[in-house]
Amino acid sequence: MTNRQIVLDRLPQGDRLAPEHFAAKVVERPVPGEGEVLLRTRYISLDAANRAWMQGATYRSALTSGQVMAGGGLSEVVVSHVPHLKPGDLVFADASWQEYAVLPGKRLVRLPDLKPETHLLSVYGVAGLTAYFGLLECGQPKPGETVVVSAAAGSVGSIVGQIARIKGCRVVGIAGGEEKGRWLTEELGFDAAVDYKSPEFKRQLRAAVPDGIDVYFDNTGGDVFEACLFAMKNFGRIACCGALSSYDGAPPTHGPRGIPGLIVTKRLTLRGFVVMDFDDQRDKALTDLQAWVADGRLKVSEDIIEGLENLPSALIGLLAGENRGKRMVRV
Amino acid sequence: MTNRQIVLDRLPQGDRLAPEHFAAKVVERPVPGEGEVLLRTRYISLDAANRAWMQGATYRSALTSGQVMAGGGLSEVVVSHVPHLKPGDLVFADASWQEYAVLPGKRLVRLPDLKPETHLLSVYGVAGLTAYFGLLECGQPKPGETVVVSAAAGSVGSIVGQIARIKGCRVVGIAGGEEKGRWLTEELGFDAAVDYKSPEFKRQLRAAVPDGIDVYFDNTGGDVFEACLFAMKNFGRIACCGALSSYDGAPPTHGPRGIPGLIVTKRLTLRGFVVMDFDDQRDKALTDLQAWVADGRLKVSEDIIEGLENLPSALIGLLAGENRGKRMVRV
């Protein structure tokens, strides 16, 4: 009756995340009280945001040393003390990096019985919904427009580009390395890919968007953000989804040039968002995503790693850009 | 039959604008051809944007050395070769810094007979319309919200703050020096003022907006922009109107910290605009502005300097923050 956990042993202090920031621990399996449920973790989602939570309060409180590492995923109900859930039900849960968790049952919602169940964490989970709402609500792309997305081979970016194609846009993905670029164009149907690690990055970007960018979906911030800002067309839109480039290491000492000057002269709109802001439109989004997956226009890429003990290296690797599509760990 | 002009003798190259960048010149008065009109300049509007035009292409082409300094103002028709204008009519014209100009008549529109006519350049001109559209369209303020405006004692800022008050908001103005601050609160009805030149600026700003900022109307960019960005509430809006802090001198080597990270975590919307983007809503805006001026809720501040020869020092002084309200030169 044990519970294996991965603890955030010490918070990184301006250094890059490394295995020694984590520690494995075995504790007693918790027992649910009134109104609570005992959950067994099946898959834990890995996201760049996990690293951002270590830097300070965001849309959730900052993490602290010694706590079980925070994270969400797919869990199975083992014991339920609420009427709307029964053993065997699947739920999304903010269950942290551990095998078992006890949570209040009130906010947990039974997930549909859908195969493969990993899609509940990728295309029908936070990644897919983030791509959907960020692109369509914040980006407002119109057919024929040019859409650029950074971290394009990641869980969100790979879906953003495909939705933009479905909506009739020309799509350019920014990713690290030529191999990822080939994958984007040959497998996912992107019109072009640009390698941000190349010394020729800015020139390549300009060549890929000769008339400028209408919609930029930003996952990275930093130099890539700046390069895209300078390439925006008048009345362009930037959907601000994350700032991956600034999560792992010391906080940046300055921001991109051209702010706010270029926002004015190009009449840009920048809008930041977090997926839960659009909870009221979730059903419509899932209906669309399911239809696109069913007719083959939206390809789902998942990168599944086995074993709770591999969570730290899986997150460190994600921050280094190892993954293609949605990374998760099967527990 | 002469025409006095102020020429942009040489473009500043990363240095601050100074009298030696300009030269006075006397040329022959131009003669209008078919479809043209001869205009006599009455008032020339001075705007921070005049300086931005010297830095490169914006929403208009960059200025070049040797040209008559660009600028708009209020002109009187002297000779007309178009049917819709007759001698004595007043028009807005992009007539440059000179006594007389010949322009195609097609795009010129006769202005209403309104007293004082200087209001056509201030509250009913670019300044008033910029304040109106930037605040109401880009800022979307709601009653009870906190609105902050930078360059608050300037032509646009002084109107932004008063409109925000009319709309039921709490208004904080950022301006240089305690005297301007007193003017904002005692004369224009701002709820509070903060001095960006004070070493205590950031602390003062935080104290003036204890619950954060809902709408920030940015005229300055730079450090003031950054301080306001960090003080924004979730779902706040930033209307990007100009970047006064970066116009006079070398272009900034970096932008504000917190971009794009804070845009995401606070779910901000930043929107840049130029007044002509809202030309189709001009009549409604003018009706509102006239009603507010008529009932005394909107006070108009004008800073009128005499003489074409004083245009260079008037612009240099404006960039240094000498003016209160709308600065213009009577020719």
Image (cartoon, coloured by chain):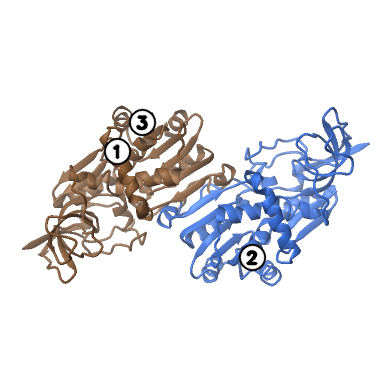
Chain colours: A brown, B blue
Q: Which residue is mark 2?
A: B166
| Res. A175 in view | no
Tell me which residue sits at (29%, 42%) in the image: A155
In the rendered view, would you say A323 is above or below B306?
above
In-image side of B230 versus A74 (left or right): right
Q: Which residue is most to the left? A: A1
In-image side of A55 versus B58 (left or right): left
Quadrant of the rendered image containing residue B118: bottom right
Q: Kindly identify the amino acid type of the residue bearing the numbered disc 1.
A: Ala
Q: Kindly identify the amino acid type of the residue bearing the numbered disc 2.
A: Ile
Quadrant of the rendered image containing residue A159: top left
Which is closer to the viewer, label 2 or label 3?
2
**How many labels sit on residues?**
3
Q: Chain of mark 1?
A: A
Which is closer to the viewer, label 3 or label 1?
1
- Residue A291 disc label: 1
Q: Kindly identify the amino acid type of the residue bearing the numbered disc 3.
A: Phe
Quadrant of the rendered image containing residue A103: bottom left
